[in-house]
Every structure is written in structure tokens, then in C-alpha cells.
Amino acid sequence: MVPRNCHLEEYEKVRVPAVDVDQEIIAYCSPDSTFAVTKKLFDDAKRSILIGIYDFSAEYIKQLVLDALARGVKVKLMLDIDSKDEQELFDDLNDAGVDGVPAPSCASHRVHFFSSSHEKVIVIDGEWCIVQSGNYSENSIPLNVKDGGDPAHFRPGNRDTGLAIRSRKLSKFFTGILESDMNLELTGPEALAQAIAAANAFMIERAPTKIPAKLFPSKTFKLTKPLAVQPVLSPDNYMQVIPGKLRAAKKSVLIEQQYIRGKQPDIQKLLTAIADARKQNKKLDIRIILGKVFGKEDLDAEKKNLALLKQQFGLVAGKNIRYIDTTRFVHCHNKMILVDGQDVLVSSQNWSDSAVSKNREAGVWLSHPGICDYFTQIFESDWKTARNAPTAPAEEIVEPESLRAGGYVRVAPADYQEV
């Protein structure tokens, strides 16, 4: 994986206004329904698909793009390319007719405006805007063709969430962001001749042995009045928007996150905002589900992190913090915040300083009780089966041939490495 501590060019932050939307919103999640929603929207595309994404490795999503090209749909792709495998997929799509541009991140050979271009934003026909936490990897968008998954033929994966919002105004805003980032790359100096990074090392782990306790089909919400949607971007406005939203919580703060880096200054500001809300209401329901740890070193670090979260912020393992059930999910790759049963953040930002202040990231904040209830049901189902303490996987030597034998999953670096 490309080092993400490169010197960054000076980036001029943009104004990020709220946008009123008034048509429909589709809420969905992985592993249950992301593929079904994605396939339908891609298959319905008539004119254009614009993709800005961090990781693109699932061959069946590549096929959806090729199918769209065959129908005459114009496809643009901005990809954070950091391995030989991704470069090959990127080149294949370019050769097929995709207008592909490398992201202007530390992985670029031209310019470095962001540590990582970690957003997951797709705009279709200038009408649908998709914002989600999951990449186009086999674990974040597993091949569950039936919306909600078929229990008899279920593909395991990460817990992720997404929103597809039908709005020309919001689509125009995110098109502007993605095309501006593409322009940063295209107007930079000529690319330096560099060796292509080797294929990223992947892990092979035991697959979940159970399906999620409850499966969630996507749900469509027809709007009867304008709804304000606040785009939340890094590095532009995440730290201007989210601390205030957390501090204003009156009843509950429910979070699913890949990890929380409790020592880092910006993340301490987010945690302090939650603590401030709790000072106003001692009974504030604060619950956080985190992803698994991937080894003994990670486990030792997470135990220290838990001690810090308890000492400085009163967040207690089991009561306030649990860990995703890896007998049902590969990982918790989600970045979701739910406040007071009505406010929702679906985004790409992990809780690390890089994610909130140095990466290109994207999400949306909105207030809608129905959408919040959909995601709250997902959270509650995950909370019931989540573990009270982190555990490291058993150390075992697993050969690649194990994938063919079944009972194992391939975990790509984008599913677990910190960004």
C-alpha cells in the first residue's frame, strides 16, 4: 500500500451548503442490499455514471460498468490507485471506454492534495447521487443479488450503509466536487515515471459461519416536502459540522465505526462533543459498535484505547462500546452516526485525524425519522450480537488454496488498513 504521509499541496476548501431534496431516497446496507440497489441504478442509467471511490476490486461491479458502456452510457471514474491489481483494473476500464483519472492523493504520480481519496460517491444521469461507507470490494458490496439477501445463498461481508438520493441539485453539487478533484490531477505536472506498486497483500480469514441475525432489504422513502441534506466533506467541513451535531444530542447517540483513534486531537474533539451532550443529560444513550481487530498487536493497542475512552470520556466496554460479531460479519466498515432517533450521517469518514482533516471524504447529514428508524433497526440488530470486548483472531497459517475449499474469505487491504 502506498504510504499516506506524503507532503500535501495546499488545498482551498470549498463552501458546502445544504441542499433541499424533494423526490425520493433509498436507504440500504451491506452485506444485505448494497449490490441489489447498485445493480438496479447502474442498469437503469441512460446517459452517464460518475464514480469517485477509494477501492475498486470486485469484478462483478466492473461488469456492471462494462454493461453500461455497451448501452452507450458515458462513465467517468476517479480511483485512488495504489497497487498493481487496481492499476490493471483501471487500465482495463480505460481501454473499454471509461474516462478514468487517478485521484489526487498520496497515491498519485502527479499531485498530492489529499492523504487518501477515500470517498465513495456515485452520480447517475445527473439525477441520482449515491453516498455510502463501502468500497467496491467483495466484502463491502458482496454479491447478494436479491435485495435483502437470500438466507439459503447468502454471501457474507462487511457491515456498511448507504443512501441513494434522487436530486439534480445534490447530484450537481457532488459532480462539481468529483470533477474538481479530477481537474486537480489533470492540471498537475506530468506524471513522474514510477514503478507500479506490487499487488497489495491480502489476508485470508475464516468466513462468518452465520448470517446476520436479521436481513434488511433496502427501503425507499418518497418525500412529501423538501428535506435539507447537508453534504459533509473532508477536509472541508466535517469538523465544522459534526461536533456541533453530537453536542446537540438530547436522547441518543448511536455510532457504527471501523475504529476510534482516541488519542488523536480531532477525534478527541468529537468525543468531547459527546461528553458535553452527556453533561446536559446523564441518561443520554451512547452506544458505539466498532470493527474487529486483526492481530495481537492491534488487540494490545485497542485495549489501551479502551482504557483511554473510559478514563477520559466515560465510555465503557460492554455498556457503551461493543465489537461487531465476526461469526456474522467479516468486519464493521461502517461510518454511521444516528442522533435522537431522527438525525443520520452516512459517510466515508473513519474516526482518525487523517480521515476528518487530510483525506478527501464525503457523506450526508439529514434529519428524517423514517430513515433514522431504518438504520436504527440495523444498529440494534448488530448491537444485540456484538461482543463486549475486542478479541484477536486465532493465529493460523492459511494458504490461498483455502479459498477454493470454502469456509474462508479474502480480506482486501482497503477493508482493514487505517486511512
Image (tube, rainbow, N blue to C red):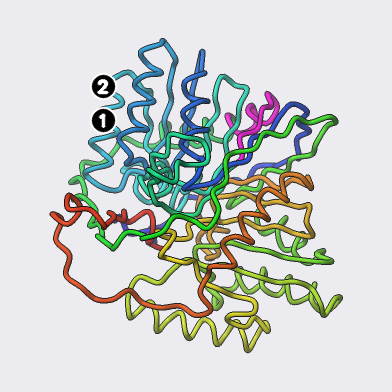
- Amino acid type at circle 1 is Asp
**Which residue is at the front of the view, 210 or 295?**
210
Count of numbered badges drawn on the protein: 2
Residue at image position (59%, 75%) is 321
Q: Position of residue 64 (x, y in %)?
A: 38, 26
Pointer 2 residue: 95
Label 2–label 1 contact, CB within 8 A:
yes
Quarter where residue 90 is shown: top left
Label 2: element kind:
helix
Vertical arrangement, residue 278 with respect to residue 403, above or below:
below
* Magenta region: 163-175
Quarter where residue 142 is shown: top left
Q: Position of residue 19 (x, y in %)?
A: 75, 35
Q: Position of residue 42 (x, y in %)?
A: 48, 24
Q: Is residue 164 magenta?
A: yes
Pointer 1 residue: 91
Q: Classify mark 1: residues with Cα within 10 Å, few (<14), some (14-19) or many (20+).
A: some
Q: Is residue 208 left or right of residue 363?
A: left
Q: Position of residue 296 (x, y in %)?
A: 33, 80
The image's mark for residue 229 is none
- Amino acid type at circle 2 is Asp
